[in-house]
Image (cartoon, rainbow, N blue to C red):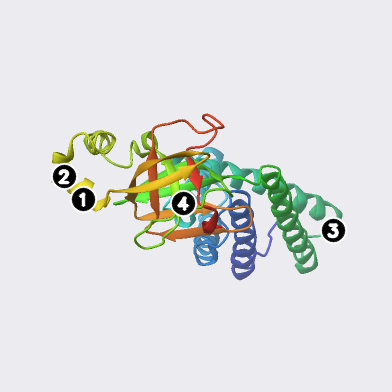
Amino acid sequence: MYQVVYIDRVFLTNLLVDYLLLRIVGNVLRCRKRYVRCAAASAFGAAFSCLLMLAGRNMAPVLRSALHGCCAVCMIWIVFSKEKISFRLKALTALYTAAFLFGGILEAVENQHPFGIRSFVLCFVLAGVSEVWITHAADRICRQRPHICPVTIAFRGTVKKLCGYYDTGNLLTDPMNQQPVSVLQADALSGVISEDTLKLLKNLSAEPDGWENTELTCLQPRFIPFAAMEKKGILLEVTLDDLLIHAPKEAVHVYRPVFALTAEPFALGKEYEVLLNSRLL
């Protein structure tokens, strides 16, 4: 018994389905504006599926599953290449979960009607509606904690994810350039800068002879005055390369963000490490 398969339909079907799945994953993980990367990863996945089909159906199921897994890993890497490995693992899990749910919809429709262009259009519409619903659900969950959001800081190629708190009362401003200043726990810089530089920062006022450190110079440390709840003083301020705030609706990118360092724990304890300036959102 023979079955006629049109390779162009296979490519188009996989292209559209993979794109929808990757968009769902991006929406769930708050990384939405990656249309070009999603399209490129979808094209890669569709081409891989066509090659796998042309290789023959006599391939061992274990080998076929392994190749599909490698394809999924490559697709996630194309879309989220700048993220950490832990984030990519979450994205891979979300991709397989979305594929499992969407595969169930396809199978249910195919059991009722022979799979054709109408069935595919129906499944595509259902997947699009699912994407909107999942995005709406994720936004509602985030609104339950409107002031807490994940943030990403970067310095000299090193990236670190932290938890930030949007503080409407934080109006701290750099007196020299009027740039908004967020407050960062000094220990949160561990892993972003070297331990020697972090130690110098913590003792900079007591040991000013460490200014010849190259990494310390790139941080542009300086002292700024502050006043909060009848408490006044000075804080050490540093400048990083990038700040990405994963707000509920969209990501906010801040180039050359300024942070005032503090050794004191914040009011909510270990729940966040950054007090975001109210002017950033």
Badge 2 vs badge 3, beta-carbon distance below 8 Å: no
Q: Earlier in the sequence, mark 3 or mark 4?
A: 3
The amino acid at mark 3 is: His
Badge 3 vs badge 4, beta-carbon distance below 8 Å: no
The amino acid at mark 2 is: Asn
Label 1, label 4: how many angstroms apart (C-alpha)?
A: 23 Å
Q: Earlier in the sequence, mark 1 or mark 4?
A: 4
Label 4, label 2: how many angstroms apart (C-alpha)?
A: 27 Å
Helix, strand or loop at label 3? It is: loop
Q: Earlier in the sequence, mark 2 or mark 3?
A: 3
Q: Nearer the viewer, mark 3 or mark 1?
A: 1
Badge 2 vs badge 1, beta-carbon distance below 8 Å: yes
> Which mark is on residue 213?
2
Q: Is residue 122 above or below residue 227?
A: below
Location of the C terminus by quadrant is bottom right
Q: Is residue 84 visible?
A: no
Instruction: Pick whichever, 199 or 224, lies toward us.
Output: 224
The amino acid at mark 4 is: Leu
Q: Residue furthest right?
A: 112
Q: Earlier in the sequence, mark 4 or mark 2?
A: 4
Helix, strand or loop at label 4? It is: loop
**Left or right position of 269 against 145:** left
> Which mark is on residue 217?
1
Label 2, label 3: how many angstroms apart (C-alpha)?
A: 70 Å
Label 3, label 1: how many angstroms apart (C-alpha)?
A: 68 Å
Q: Nearer the viewer, mark 4 or mark 2?
A: 4
Q: Is residue 64 above or below residue 44?
A: above
Residue identifier under label 4: 172
Label 2, label 1: how many angstroms apart (C-alpha)?
A: 6 Å
